[in-house]
Amino acid sequence: MKLYNSIGPNPRAVRMFAAEKQIEIPRIEVDLIGGENRREPYLRKNPMGQLPALELETGECITEIVAICEYLEDTHPSPPLIGSTPEEKAESRKWTRCVDLNICEPMANGFRFCEGLALFQNRIVTVPEAADGLKRIAQDRIGWLDAHMGGKEFVCGPRFTLADILLFCFLDFGRQVGQPLREENKNIAAWFQRVKSRPAARA
């Protein structure tokens, strides 16, 4: 396997997932700032031009964070980061999707349409007038999740899962691009420190 890697929270989530499973995957660095991901030969790996991408020994490439992590879970089931039973898998998939759609996506697009506009405006459709609203949506959903996290060690209770990894990588990214975690979100702040202390968080 080879991981096409770059800066940003998306590749980091896959690196962290792999690190939790102690999977060593050789990396090929792609210059995101220079737009290497938006031209050949990378577009033959991922026509969408997004990162990361996991290239298998067959030459086939898996793209999208969740799909890559699902593959790694299936091929390296221990320790389980999605689940060992249908019930565990359903719970972690539910929360992963909730975090992705309600927090990660509006946070990322809030950045792309504002602080990152100069980088992204000639690569994707950007809507600068939507940036503030997207950031508000992300913060509102973080506040909602904070209430849910009361008394819980991780998003799925006692189990550390992909949902935690995705949330951690994007909240850490957010604080670097003008979307810091608000002080009133004390449950998530405590959770963030727990996750940050894990060795895989440095991946």
Image: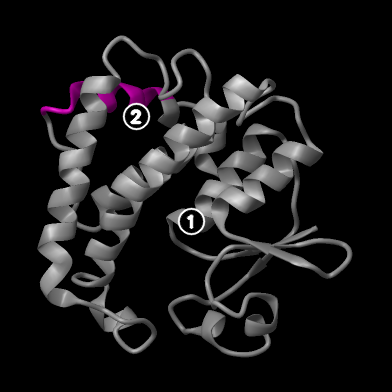
Q: How far is disc 2 from disc 1 in space, using C-alphas? A: 18 Å
Write the residue at 69% across / 22% down: 84
- By what rule are the colours in the image chosen? one colour
Residue 76 x %, y %: 78, 35
Query: Disc 2 or 1, which lies upstream in sequence?
Result: 1
Which structural element holds mark 2? helix
Please rate how many residues cluster around mark 1, counting C-alpha atoms within 10 Å: few if below 14, some from 14 to 19, many from 20: many
Q: Is 71 left, or right, of 102 in this rendering?
A: right
Q: Is residue 24 magenta?
A: no
Q: As drawn, is 84 to the left or to the right of 196?
A: right
Where is mark 2, residue-wise?
A: 192
Give the residue at x 25% y 48%: 175
Which residue reaches farthest right?
Answer: 58
Q: Label 2 is placed on what type of residue?
A: Phe
Instruction: Please give the range of residues in magenta.
Output: 184-194
Q: Is mark 1 on a helix, strand or loop?
A: helix
Q: Which mark is residue 10?
A: 1
